[in-house]
Image (cartoon, rainbow, N blue to C red):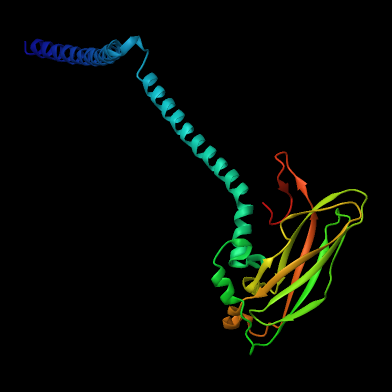
Amino acid sequence: MNSLPQLGRRFLDRSATWACSSCRRAQAQWQRGSAQRFVSQTSKRAQQELPNGQPGASAPRMDRMAEEYRRKNRTTMFYTISIILGTVAFSYGSVPMYKMICQTTGWGGQPVRAHGAGGTGDDEDLASRLKPVKDAKRIRVTFSSSVSDVLPWKFVPQQREVRVLPGETALAFYTATNKSDKDIIGVATYSVTPAQVAPYFSKIQCFCFEEQRLNAGETVDMPVFFYLDPDLLNDLNMKGVETVTLNYTFFKAKYDDNGKLKGIPGVS
């Protein structure tokens, strides 16, 4: 009589175990379905909230990024154009600027333009410098010349050298001859060696950097009026300098479309 209740209890326990396993599976399926429905409903609400029926949130973000890139590209383009224009302007202004600096400071071996020469500057200052230093040693000034290969001129100094005191004026001459059968315009540049003398070599009158027109077969004399500034006696770099060389080089004048000289060193 006791075996029947025991069989019933075992049967009920197995049914309960089976029922619990089924419930668990059903519960898991329901949870997965709920999660999927939640994600789907959230996506639908997000799409409904977008303006103008746009398909997703990535579209406005991409538009903002594209606009930012366009703004940066415009800024870079403006900077590049500014640099190019500045470089072009500097290249046009560098030649006359270099010439002015060299004539003022004597850089590049170019003699300094004398104060007050040509009717400009302080004439009294020039007069005060044009006082020979009697107790100083005379300095030997030699002259040399050269001509460009494309210029059919003969160009030579009339004297080999002169000896001058600091503050003493000196006059020298060069002779130029046009050996061709055509009228030619030439332009001369000059330099002084050694380089440390250039700031003290001042010219009062000179034919350099000016257009010199010679007719076919013509010969002309070209003067150079200069002096050595007495301040050179106070410069330690001038100690032991006893010889100075003044050199002139003639080039054939060439012009651009605007009628300006081009291709001449130191000429704007």
Q: Quadrant of residue 143?
A: bottom right
Residue 217 in the image: state x and y as whole percent.
Answer: 92, 55
Count of residue discs: 0
Instruction: Between residue 215 and residue 142, name the one nearer to us.
Output: 215
Residue that lies at the very extreme toward the left in this rendered image: 1
**Image: 165 above or below 247:** below
**Image: 76 above or below 190:** above
Q: Is residue 176 left or right of residue 168?
A: right
Q: Is residue 191 left or right of residue 43?
A: right
**Image: 8 above or below 167:** above
Instruction: Between residue 165 and residue 103, name the one nearer to us.
Output: 165
**Residue drawn 85% across and 54% down?**
151
Instruction: Between residue 16 and residue 57, name the one nearer to us.
Output: 57
Residue 264 in the image: state x and y as whole percent.
Answer: 73, 53
Quarter occupied by the N terminus: top left
**Image: 141 above or below 257:** below
Residue 103 in the image: state x and y as whole percent.
Answer: 62, 63
Q: Is residue 156 left or right of residue 81?
A: right
**Residue drawn 78% across and 62% down?**
249
